[in-house]
Image: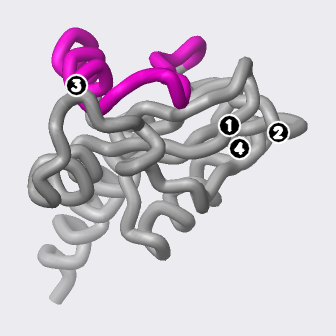
Amino acid sequence: MRKQIKEVMSSPCITAALKDNVYELAVLMKQHDIGFIPIVEGTRLIGAVTDRDLVVRGYAEKHSGSTAVETVMTTDVLTIPPDTTMEEAADLMAKHKIRRLPVVENGHLVGVVAIGDLAVRDAFIQEAGEALNEISEHVH
């Protein structure tokens, strides 16, 4: 049976709210060694902020640390349900060139899956590819 995202996602995850500011998000990212923070109202996902958002939409636009999260957050966030397979999530990440996906059920954030969470799958594919390569090299 295929592994589902709910088996590998980070849950609970670090979140922030609209009342938070850019500096507070930067501190959370540093404290937890993360580069992605879902923005929630209660448990309902309303957006997300990446470390890149802080730099490009925040500091590069000369916004101070007291700038509201809303100024730098992405509101049109791609999400997946918890029963998504690891393969489906990996395909979505590759297609949209993203590294993290919020996992949402009935509009509520239940976790986050990062590209690193799929490493087991990728390692298996890489090992299989290397094995096939070695087998093919010895065939004349």
Q: Which mark is residue 107?
A: 2
User: At numbered mark 2, what does the secondary structure look like: helix, strand or loop?
Assistant: loop
User: In this rendering, does residue 71 appear at all?
Assistant: yes
- Magenta extent: 11-33
Question: Between 9 and 71, which is closer to the camera in this rendering?
Answer: 71
Q: Is residue 93 left or right of residue 128?
A: right
Q: Would you call the spot at circle 2 few (<14 residues within 10 Å), some (14-19), or many (20 or more)?
A: few
Q: Which residue is mark 4?
A: 2
Distance CA(mark 1)–CA(mark 4): 27 Å
Q: Which mark is residue 23?
A: 3
Three-letter code, disc 4: Arg
Horizontal and vertical percent position of residue 69: 41, 37
User: At numbered mark 3, what does the secondary structure look like: helix, strand or loop?
Assistant: helix
Three-letter code, disc 1: Leu
Distance CA(mark 3)–CA(mark 2): 27 Å
Q: Which residue is mark 1?
A: 45
Distance CA(mark 2)–CA(mark 4): 24 Å
Vertical comparison of 50 with 60: above or below: above
Horizontal and vertical percent position of residue 54: 23, 45
